[in-house]
Amino acid sequence: MESSGTAPALRLAGLTKTFGDRPAVDHIDLEVPPGSFFGLIGPNGAGKTTSLSMAVGLLRPDSGRSQIFGVDVWADPARAKELIGVLPDGLSMPERLTGRELLRFTGLLRGMEVPEVERRSGELLEILELADTGRTLVMEYSTGMRKKIGLATALLHAPKLLVLDEPLEAVDPASAATIKVILRRFVRDGGSVVFSSHVMAVVEQLCDHVAVIASGRVVASGPLEIVRSGRSLEERFMDLVGGQAPEMGELAWLSS
Amino acid sequence: MAVLLIRMKLAVLRNSMNGQRAVRLVTGAVAGLTLAAGLILLAGRDYPVTSLRFDVLGAGFALWTAGWLLGPALFGGGDETLRPEQFSLLPLTPRRLAAGMAASSFVGVGPLVTLVAFSALVVASVKTGLGAAATVVGVLAVVLQLSVCVLASRLITAVLGQVMRSKVGAALAALVSAAILAGLHSSWVLSPLAQSALRTGFPDSFSAWLTALPSSWGLLAVRAAAQGNWPTVAAVLAGLVALGLLCWYGWAGLLKRRLATRRASGRPVRMSSGDWARGPVTAVVARELRTWSRDLLRFHYLVFALCYALVFCLLPLAVGASIFLPWTGLVFALWVAAISANLYGEDGTELWGRLMIPGSARHDVRGRQLAWLLVTAPATLVLTIAMVVFTGEYGLWPWLATVLPALLGGGAGVTVLVSVLRPVPMTDPRLRGGNLLENGTDFAQVLMVLILSAATTAPAYFTARLGPVWAGPVVGLAGGTLLAWLLGRWAAAKLESSAPELLQYLRTGVSPRRKRPAPAWKPQKSSLPKPEPHLEKLGLHLAPNGQRVYVVASLVLCWVPLAAQGIVPALMLTTGQITPSWFLALHLPQHLQWPAITAMICLGLTMLITGLGIGLHYRAKSRRAGGELEPTTR
C-alpha cells in the first residue's frame, strides 16, 4: 500500500453502476492529487452523484474500486471513513435537532471527547454564521443554512479529504461566499476537496483540477488549464458533451 | 366551472385506471353495496316494537355518517383526485373553486353507494305504510343527507389536516382513532346490551340522543310527514340544507387557508441541555428522545398507544368488568412496540450520516433500544401500578412481574430488528408537509410486531403457569434482557453489513436485491409513492379471490376466538373473576373450560398466522410488481 503522503487523495478505478439496463456510471477512472481543489462537472444525469456516492461508501458499486489516500473504501471502510468528510445533495439530516445539537451528537457518535466537540462546533457555528440560530430545528433551515450545517458536520472530525455534492446549489451569494472561503482555507492548509457542480463559473473560480463526466464516463480530466486548452470552460464543456445553443424562432406572440 | 371540474375528475380517474385500481374500485363498491343492502334489509324487516325500525335505522345512518367523517382520518387521505393546489394559479375566487370542488366530490363510488344505503329511509317509509307524502319527503331527505355527509366529510378531513400540524392536533387525532379502534376491538362488551335492545326496544334516552343527530333528521322528517306535522318537516329539511351550506362554507374557508400557507411555521423548540449525553450510545439516546418529543408523527403514535390502552381496558367497565384494568400498562407497551418498529424508515435518508461514521451501527441500535425503553417503561410501570392499586388486584403481581419485563425487553429487541430487516420507506421528514394524514401506516407491519412482541412473553408466561411462583418473574426479567441484547445484536450486525442497501431502499423505495429496473440514484425526488390504502396497501389485489376473502376474514375474525373467547375467559379463570356472559368456555362443565379456551386460542392463532402469512406473501409479491411501476407513477 502506498503511504498516505504520496497516494492520491481519491482514486476511482473502473467504478461501474447499472440501474436496470441503463449504466449510470460506466467504468469511471479518476485520480484526485493530494492537496488539489478538484471540480467534477457534467450535465444533469451524467452520473456525478452516483460516482461520488460510490466513491465515499454510500452506494455499493457493481464493480471497480475506490481508494482514499490508498485505503479501499469498500474493503476497509472504517479507516477510509476517518479520512473523509462528506456533504451529499438532497439527503436528509437529523432534522429534529438544532444545529448545535446535531454537531454535538455527531461528534459524540464519532467517539470524540465532549470538550473537544464543544470547542470545534462552537468555532464552526461561529465561522459559518449559524451561532445565533439557537432553537431552530435543522428541518426549518433554509437551503443555504442546510448546506452550511452539512459542511460543519463534514468538517467536525478534521478530515483530510472533503467530498461535496453540489455544495453551492441553490445557495444565496452570501452563504456561498462563506462556503468558498472555508473551502479555500481547507485546501491552503493541506486538505483536498472534490466537489461536483454544473456551474462553470464556480469551477473556474475555485478549482485547479477538473474532470468532465458525460453519460457515465469521464470525457476529460486533468489540471484546469489543460482541460480548458485556452478557451473558456463553458465553451470547452459544450464541445465535450455535445450541447448547442438553441436557435431563436417562433413564439412571436410573446412579444408585446 | 363545476361541470368542468367533474369532467376533469372523470378524466383523471379514467387515465389512472389500471388493473389494480379497477379491482380496488370494484371490491370497494361491492363491499359498500353489501353494507348498503344490509341497511335496506334492516329497514324492511319486521320488528317486535314499531319504533325499533327507526331506531335501528338511525343507528345505522349514524355509523355510516361516522364512517364518512372519520374514515379519511383513520385510513389516510380522503379524496384527493383533484387537489386545490392544482388550481391555485388560476384566477378563481376560493369560494368558486370550493363550489366546483364540492360538486366534483359527489362524483365517485362512495357517494353512489351512500345514496343506495340512505334509500333505506324510503324503504322504511313504504314498509311502515306512512303514505305517499312521507315517501316524497323521504326521497328529498335522502338527497340532502347525502350532501351533508359528503360536505361534512370534506370539512372534517380539512380541519384534521390543518389541526394535525400541531402537537395538540396530533394528540387529538390519536385520541379519536385510538378510541374508535379500541372501541371496535372491545365491541364484544356491548353485544349483550345490543341483543337485549333488539328484543325490547332501545332505551328512551338513547333514542332521544340518536334522533338529535343530523344523520337521523331524515327519519324525523319522514315520521313528521306521516303525522301531517308540516312545520316540523320544513324545519328539519331546512336544517339539513343549512348544515350542508355551513359545511361547504367552512370548507371553502379552509381551502383558502390551505392554498395560502405552506407549512406550520417553525416554532422554537424547548431546549434541554443534554449534558448527560457524553458518549456515542447516550448521544443516540438523547437524539432519539428529542425525536420522540419533537416529531409530530412519533408523538401522535405515542398518544395513540396510551389512548388505545386506556379505552380498551376501561370500556369493559360499562358492563361492570374491571378484568382488563391491571393489564393497561401491558397493552400500552405492546402498542408502543407495534408503532415504533419503523425507526429507520421514519428517519428516511438520514441514514447516510450514520454510514459515514465508522462503527456507529452498534451504538445507533443500542441507543435506540435504550431510548425506546426510557419512553415506554416508566409509563408502563405507572399505568400498571396505578391500575393494580385502583382495582385492588394485588394477587396479580406475580403475573405482571412475569410478563412486563419480558414484554419490555422483547419490545426493545423486536422494534430495532424489524426496523432494520423490514423497513417501510417513508418520505423524508422535511418533505412530509405537516399533514399526518398523508403518512399512511403500514398495517401489516403493525400487526406483525404486535404478534412478535407478544410472543416474546411466551417463555415467561409458561414458566409462571407451570413452575413455582418465583420462577415467572426471574424468567421474565432474564428472558427480556437476553432478547433485547440478542435481537439488538442481530439488528446491529445486519445494519453494519447492509447499510448501503438499506439507504438505497429508503431513498428509492425499491429493494436493491431485485433484478429489475431500479430508479437511478439521483436526489431531488420530492416524495416516495404514498402507500395506497385498503387492498393495495395490504398487497391483496394480486391474491386470488378465495384467498383474499380468507385473509380479510381471518384477520378480522381471529380476534373473536383468540381474544374474546380465549384470552379474556382465560384471564377470568386465572383471576377468579368470572362473568360467563357470551364466553363459550365459561358455560361448559369445569373440566372442559381450559381445553375449550386452549382450542379457541389455537383456532384464533391459526387464523391469525395463516391469514397473516398469506397476506404477507401477496404483499411481498405486490411490492415486487408495484416497484416496477414506480418510475412512471412518480
Image: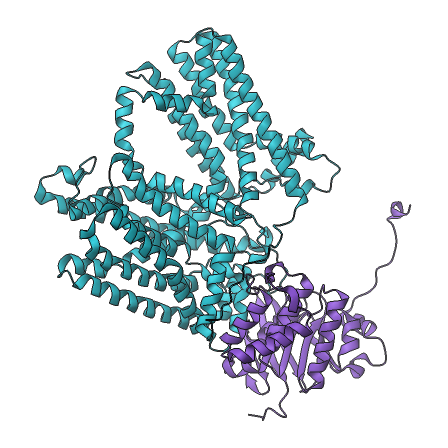
Q: Position of residue A46 (x, y in %)?
A: 68, 68
Q: State whether residue B330 is above or below residue B87.
A: below
Q: Position of residue B487 (x, y in %)?
A: 34, 67
Q: State whether residue A3 is above or below residue B523.
A: below
The answer to whether B1 appears left or right of B194 in the picture is right
Residue A133 lies in quadrant: bottom right
Camera-side residue of A26 and B563: B563
Residue B586 lies in quadrant: top left
Camera-side residue of B83 and B632: B83
**What scheme was used to colour the molecule?**
by chain
Residue B126 lies in quadrant: top left
The mark tally for this picture is 0
The answer to whether B589 appears left or right of B357 in the picture is left
Colour chain B is painted in? cyan
Camera-side residue of B436 and A207: B436
Camera-side residue of B508 and B234: B234
The answer to whether B327 appears left or right of B250 in the picture is left
Q: Position of residue B394 (x, y in %)?
A: 20, 52
Residue under the image location 69 percent in, 40 percent down: B87
Q: In this rendering, does residue A114 appear at all?
A: yes
Colour chain A is painted in? purple
Quarter of the figure with the N terminus of chain A: bottom right
Quarter of the figure with the C terminus of chain A: top right
Q: In this rendering, does residue A15 appear at all?
A: no
Residue under the image location 55 percent in, 43 percent down: B163
Q: State whether residue A154 is above or below residue B578.
A: below
